[in-house]
Amino acid sequence: MKKESILFGIIGFLLGCILSFVFTNNLNRNHLQAQTSVQPDANSAQNPLLPEGHPSLDDSGNPTTQGGAPLPQVQEALKAAQEQPNNFEVQMNAGDLYYQIQKFDESIKFYEQANKLRPGLIEVLTQLGNANFDSEKFEQAEEWYLKVLAKNPNDINVRTDLGLTFFLREPRNIERAIKEYQIALGKEPNHELTLQNLAIALREKGDTQGFQETIEKLRSVNPNNPILKNSP
């Protein structure tokens, strides 16, 4: 959910491409919010961190009514999670609420508790990967994504996000990112998000031929893909 501005330091083509691929990659996980390099006031009506129509947030990041009071259903959900630590559904609900308001570290706690209650569920493992990713804990996200892929190696979206963990971490591991993208494309050659991520990785690697070939493939899949506007 916070992929839009992680890569703001790369110049020229990469700057435009990364902003595009990070934004669209969010869509493959149905993320609700964007990230900017400078965080605006959480209560601003123009806050791009929140989806349109999202309630305001209080100082603790909890959704609020127009009067500033936390939404009753949110209060009840979080209280229930604290009072029912052995209730899987309640823990997941609390984790999802925190995730939606971008309190990723808090959401991780609830997802971890849910995973203890029902170990190894793909839904929980994926959310743990996503929450760690959006906390920019890319090594931890990698671990959870690998657990998902051990159960379902054909999950193209998770495989693509796994590749991104290598592309976005410091130090960057371009070769491993490319490898994961290529594995994903071996299963679904026309997967648009993977193609655009691969193009960006190849461009940064300096693989001009591979980049051009991937761009042409991407153009055949979707001639309106955002990064094509920045390509030769």
Image (cartoon, grey):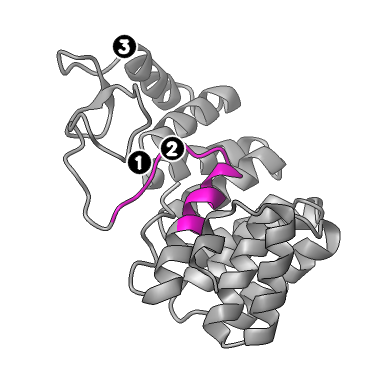
- Relative vertical location of residue 3 with respect to residue 90 in this rendering, above or below: below
The answer to whether residue 144 is magenta is no
**Residue at position x 56%, y 37% from top?**
30
Q: Quadrant of residue 27?
A: top right
SS class, disc 1: loop
Residue 162 locus on image (x, y percent): 62, 62
CA gap between label 2 and label 3 equals: 18 Å
CA gap between label 3 and label 1 equals: 18 Å
Q: Viewed as shown, does residue 73 lie left or right of 87?
A: left
Q: Name the kind of residue labelled 1 in the image.
A: Lys
Q: Quadrant of residue 220?
A: bottom right
State yes or no: discs 3 and 1 in contact (Cβ < 8 Å): no
Q: Residues within 10 Å of mark 3 (few under 14, many from 20)?
A: few
SS class, disc 3: helix
Residue 209 locus on image (x, y percent): 69, 85
Q: Which residues are magenta?
A: 20-36
- Relative vertical location of residue 84 with respect to residue 39 in this rendering, above or below: above
Q: Residues within 10 Å of mark 1 (few under 14, many from 20)?
A: some
Q: Name the kind of residue labelled 2 in the image.
A: Tyr
SS class, disc 2: helix
Q: Is residue 176 visible?
A: yes
State yes or no: discs 2 and 1 in contact (Cβ < 8 Å): yes
The answer to whether residue 29 is magenta is yes
Q: Viewed as shown, does residue 170 lie left or right of 63?
A: right
- Relative vertical location of residue 198 with respect to residue 1 in this rendering, above or below: below
* Among numbered discs 3 and 1, the one appearing first in the sequence: 3
Q: Name the kind of residue labelled 3 in the image.
A: Pro
State yes or no: discs 2 and 3 in contact (Cβ < 8 Å): no
What residue would you read off at disc 1? 103
Q: Which disc is residue 99 wearing?
A: 2
